[in-house]
Image (cartoon, rainbow, N blue to C red):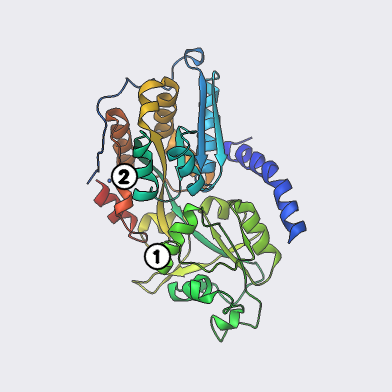
Amino acid sequence: MSILSRVRSRARAFYAASILAALAGVVAIAACGGGDGAASTPASSPAASLSGTIAVAGSSTVFPISEAVAEEFSKRHNGVRVNVASSGTGAGGRAMCQEGTIEIWNASRPAKQEVEMDVCRENGIELIELPVAFDALSVVVSPDNDWAPCLSVEKLRTIFGPEAQDRVTNWDQVDARYPDRRLRIYGPTTASGTFDYFTEAIMGESGAHRGDLDLATEEDPLIASGVNGTPGGIGYFGMAYLNQYRDLVTPVEVENPSSGQCVAPSAETVESGEYLPLARPIFIYVRADAMESRPEVRAFVDFYLEEAPGLVTDVGYVPLPDSVYQWGKDKVADLVTGSVFNTIEAGVPISEALERAN
């Protein structure tokens, strides 16, 4: 069984009860600290040489990558237990910065300066920011939807914007050419990094989103199930879940604001820079003190960056350029902390974001 199959199998088992229950109920680097850290533990070290438990939590979008990395890492270091939880980017940030209960935070958006970076620093925690993959945030509709194969940013605002709440309830209110079909909306909660990125990229303001969703959840399989179960359904999530649930939902092309062309979410359109404004980098954030004092954490992060290109592809995302992974390795080696990407607005072409970050 492949890595992706094993991860998907475990994810399906984990979410099965939740799905049934729900249906029944309804890089200029800002170096703020750092220095020379402890020597990296080679990923090929004997398994018995490392032990301990590493807690990883946060974004459901990044979850499949970190879960796949953890599975492969445990084969080489069976004395280390890596627990990966899907709790949402915001909840992961709280676990890292307010509670100090995790070593690695999965994030589908850059860390917010005041909400996370500053709070972490106030609590004596410095974060190393590491982009790990590209994602095409994907808008999906029911397979019965044959009227909206492509949506412009303006129409997405009409559907999801805060002004639509309790007012835009039918598809023909989005476009008079669309049928008189009830609009059913499924999406992430306000704690989700995907929610934050989508609202900033589409509405121009993080958090600017209608609140009357038919279902708001951190469990992406429930979004796919809800959209599939209603002919007028629409939702959005990361590309790995689109690839996983293509038998349940249909991806919508998004009109590129610059070219006017309708562009489908895919590895090719992310790499070419055509899929705008919903292409984005996704991240892990690591505690610098854990990297210094705990060789098992250092070894896991080294392994993550080394193996990410292949594993990212396996679970359905797009690898970063090799130079960006090397940039991350250099940050780890020097324990460079702070966020570069939180100064780059959502929807900026990835090539430009990476150029600024470097």
> Quick one: which residue is furthest to the front in this view?
122
Q: Which residue is mark 1?
A: 205
> Quick one: which residue is furthest to the left in this view?
28
**Residue 192 visible to an observer of this rendering:** yes
Q: Is residue 77 left or right of residue 232?
A: left
Q: Which residue is mark 2?
A: 339
Quadrant into which the N terminus falls = top right
User: Height in image: 243 above or below 126?
Assistant: below
Image-quadrant location for residue 96: top left
Q: CA distance from mark 1 to mark 2?
A: 20 Å
- Expressed as whole percent of the image width and height from the top left, the position of residue 72 reads 53, 29
Q: Is residue 19 left or right of residue 61?
A: right
User: Height in image: 267 above or below 252?
Assistant: above
**For this rendering, which residue is in front, 166 or 281?**
166
Quadrant into which the C terminus falls = top left
Image-quadrant location for residue 269: bottom left
Mark 1 or mark 2, which has the lower sequence index?
1
Label 2 secondary element:
loop
> Quick one: which residue is furthest to the right in this view?
24
